[in-house]
């Protein structure tokens, strides 16, 4: 695939920037051209947060995603804000545990993943982001799943190395959904 323009959005503290960083590192491992641009409100936890990730086979001209072909959202305000920006034929991934409404558009594919409920059921309540990311990867092919292990080793800080297996299990649950 030549290029994916991805927006990941929700509340601060949901691991959205981490999800984007995992995608970016996986792209780096695969030798792709990429951009990872985080953005968050004044309160890191509880304020709005999003990141733009571009994975490309050619150099990336701008890190800003204006017309995403992939949207991953974990709260209603983010779905409201970004739904209409997705290109026709794009894919929208929704944490249906947290977002009650359906996508209004008929020219995009919508995936409703109860990621927060799945994470709680697995005993990993903070890893809904990774479950949803696993579904994104499985349904879009934006990165090769074999790159995930190496990417996680780069992104997870040493003080949290014990969370590697839980993150991999969450990604695999999302890919299997």
Image (tube, grey):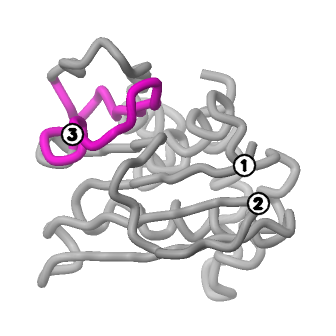
| Residue visible at 40% across and 61% down in the picture | 65
Residue 109 % position (x, y) = 43, 19
Please name whichever residue, 174 or 65, is drawn nearer the observer in this view of the structure.
Answer: 65
**Above-or-below relation of 106 to 38:** above
Residue 49 part of the magenta segment: no
Lower sequence index among marks 1 and 2 = 1
Q: Nearer the viewer, mark 1 or mark 3?
A: 1
* Crowding near the residue tagged with mark 2, few <14, some 14–19, many ≥20 C-alpha atoms within 10 Å: some
Q: Secondary structure at mark 3?
A: helix
Q: Nearer the viewer, mark 3 or mark 2?
A: 2
Q: Report, in whole angstroms, how far the alpha carbon at label 1 lies from the one at label 3.
A: 26 Å
The magenta-colored residue range is 79-100
Q: Report, in whole angstroms, how far the alpha carbon at label 3 lies from the one at label 2.
A: 28 Å
Which residue corresponds to mark 3?
79
Which residue corresponds to mark 2?
57
**Above-or-below relation of 139 to 13:** above
Residue 95 part of the magenta segment: yes
| Residue visible at 50% across and 48% down in the picture | 124
Q: Quadrant of residue 165?
A: bottom right
- Residues at discs 1 and 2 in contact (Cβ within 8 Å): yes
Which residue corresponds to mark 1?
2
Residue 94 % position (x, y) = 35, 32
Horizontal side of residue 31 vs 174, given as left or right: right
Q: Secondary structure at mark 2?
A: loop
The quadrant of the image that shows the N terminus is top right
């Amino acid at each position: 695939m030549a290029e994916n323009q991805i927006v990941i959005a929700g509340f601060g503290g949901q691991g959205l920037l981490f999800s984007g960083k995992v995608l970016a590192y996986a792209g780096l491992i695969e030798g792709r051209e990429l951009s990872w641009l985080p953005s968050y409100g004044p309160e890191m936890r509880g304020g709005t947060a999003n990141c733009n990730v571009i994975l490309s086979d050619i150099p990336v001209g701008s890190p800003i995603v204006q017309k995403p072909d992939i949207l991953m959202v974990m709260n209603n305000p983010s779905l409201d804000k970004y739904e209409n920006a997705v290109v026709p034929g794009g894919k929208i991934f929704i944490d249906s545990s947290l977002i009650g409404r359906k996508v209004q558009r008929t020219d995009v594919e919508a995936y409703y993943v109860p990621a927060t409920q799945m994470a709680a059921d697995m005993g990993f309540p903070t890893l809904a982001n990774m479950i949803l990311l696993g579904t994104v990867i499985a349904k879009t092919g934006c990165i090769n799943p074999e790159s995930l292990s190496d990417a996680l080793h780069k992104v997870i800080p040493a003080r949290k190395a014990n969370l590697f297996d839980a993150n991999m299990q969450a990604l695999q649950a999302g890919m299997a959904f």
